[in-house]
Image: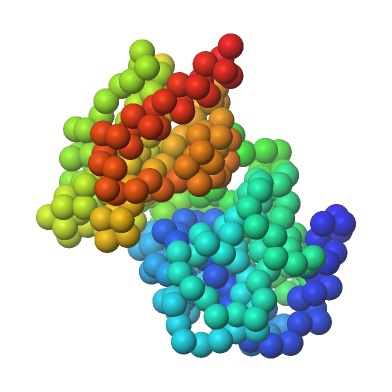
């Protein structure tokens, strides 16, 4: 067991009290898969635990065991411990949580630190991998197929089904172990996550791709979605999952920008993706966001307008590209 895991293992073994495992807002496969795996395991060892999120579980993750156990946050209930999963800060939960103390389980660099038992492994390919090693060291014999499916889903989605830059040898070894030891079916996971598109999503994608623009000599591509388009199609924000990758896939493009209008929150939600020459986390950190080198996000004020938001982003991206290419 690596030293980084020891405090968290010892803490969770001894902890008594009401626990909330919280996924970040606009949840993805890693935060949902990691949280559910931890939730199922802690229930097995007799802990009083709930799992929650500000937003509902995306339709493409509803196949995961215990996904219906998610409670919507905020809640009036008070907890003795809130475990923030796959988020650099409790602020990423997007809502208030009443808890006496917080703990963070994550693989992102930077962010907030809450206690000596925080479990943050920067070298891990996904938070799901961190959770697997944590559970294995708590009591590996209790990991069953349901828990393994949740972990595999988190790992697969965060690595883009094993093609993104965080697809390390460790990621592939862990995926192989989950399949061989616990009977996870990669095809079943892939079909559930990638091939359950509602018609409204494809119609929305068609509209979003019409906004495609190239910038900085074709090195940057941008797309956006407006709230009224979602309303007209009966679509949701979760229907936009993965849209940014269409912009990144263009030949010659190094950075993709995807801007989502969220007027009810007073923001433009920004997702940036890089093919490798630009560290987009540096760009997002300029606007109070963050993430990984090749995948990051941030929020900008809605009252600034879309054109101004794009210009701000392009200015910072140009700096990063010129520095890192030079």
The quadrant of the rendering that contains the C terminus is: top right
Say left or right for 163 vs 113: left
Whole-percent x, y for residue 67 in the image: 46, 72
Q: Nearer the viewer, residue 311 or 33?
A: 311
Q: Of all residues shown, which one is farthest toward the left?
A: 232
Say left or right for 150 vs 59: right
Q: Quadrant of residue 218?
A: top left
- The residue at 46%/35% (across/down) is 273
Residue 230, relative to residue 100: is it above or below?
above
- The residue at 26%/34% (across/down) is 307
Q: Nearer the viewer, residue 64 or 21?
A: 21
Q: Nearer the viewer, residue 130 or 89?
A: 89
**Colouring rule applied to residues:** rainbow
- Whether residue 197 is visible: no
- Whether residue 96 is visible: yes
Say left or right for 322 vs 179: left
Whole-percent x, y for residue 187 in the image: 48, 51
Whole-percent x, y for residue 142 in the image: 73, 74
How many marks are shown on the rendered structure?
0
- The residue at 39%/67% (across/down) is 55
Whole-percent x, y for residue 270 in the image: 39, 43
Q: Of all residues shown, which one is farthest toward the front?
A: 303
- The residue at 37%/17% (across/down) is 216
The quadrant of the rendering that contains the N terminus is: bottom right
């Amino acid at each position: 067991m690596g030293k980084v895991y020891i405090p968290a293992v010892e803490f969770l073994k001894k902890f008594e009290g009401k626990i909330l495992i919280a996924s970040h807002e606009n949840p993805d496969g890693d935060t949902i898969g990691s949280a559910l795996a931890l939730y199922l395991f802690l229930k097995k060892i007799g802990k009083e635990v709930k799992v929650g999120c500000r937003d509902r579980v995306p339709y493409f993750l509803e196949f995961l065991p215990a996904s219906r156990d998610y409670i919507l946050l905020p809640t009036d209930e008070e907890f003795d411990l809130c475990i923030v999963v796959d988020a650099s800060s409790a602020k990423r939960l997007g809502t208030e949580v009443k808890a006496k103390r917080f703990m963070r389980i994550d693989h992102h660099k930077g962010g907030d630190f809450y206690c000596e038992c925080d479990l943050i492994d920067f070298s891990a390919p996904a938070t799901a991998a961190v959770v697997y090693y944590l559970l294995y060291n708590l009591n590996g014999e209790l990991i069953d197929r349901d828990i393994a499916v949740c972990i595999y889903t988190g790992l697969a989605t965060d690595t883009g089904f094993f093609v993104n830059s965080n697809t390390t040898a460790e990621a592939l070894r862990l995926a192989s172990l989950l399949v061989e030891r616990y009977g996870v079916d990669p095809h079943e996971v892939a079909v559930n996550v990638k091939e359950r598109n509602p018609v409204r999503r494809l119609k929305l994608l068609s509209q979003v791709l019409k906004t495609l623009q190239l910038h900085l000599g074709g090195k940057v591509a941008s797309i956006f979605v407006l709230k009224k388009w979602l309303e007209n199609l009966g679509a949701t924000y979760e229907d936009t999952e993965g849209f940014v990758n269409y912009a990144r896939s263009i030949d010659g493009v190094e950075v993709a920008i995807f801007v989502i209008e969220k007027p009810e929150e007073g923001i433009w939600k920004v997702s940036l993706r890089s093919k490798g020459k630009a560290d987009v986390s540096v760009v997002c950190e300029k606007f109070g966001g963050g993430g990984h080198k090749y995948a990051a996000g941030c929020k900008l004020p809605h009252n600034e307008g879309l054109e101004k938001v794009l210009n701000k982003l392009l200015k910072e991206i140009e700096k990063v590209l010129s520095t890192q290419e030079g």
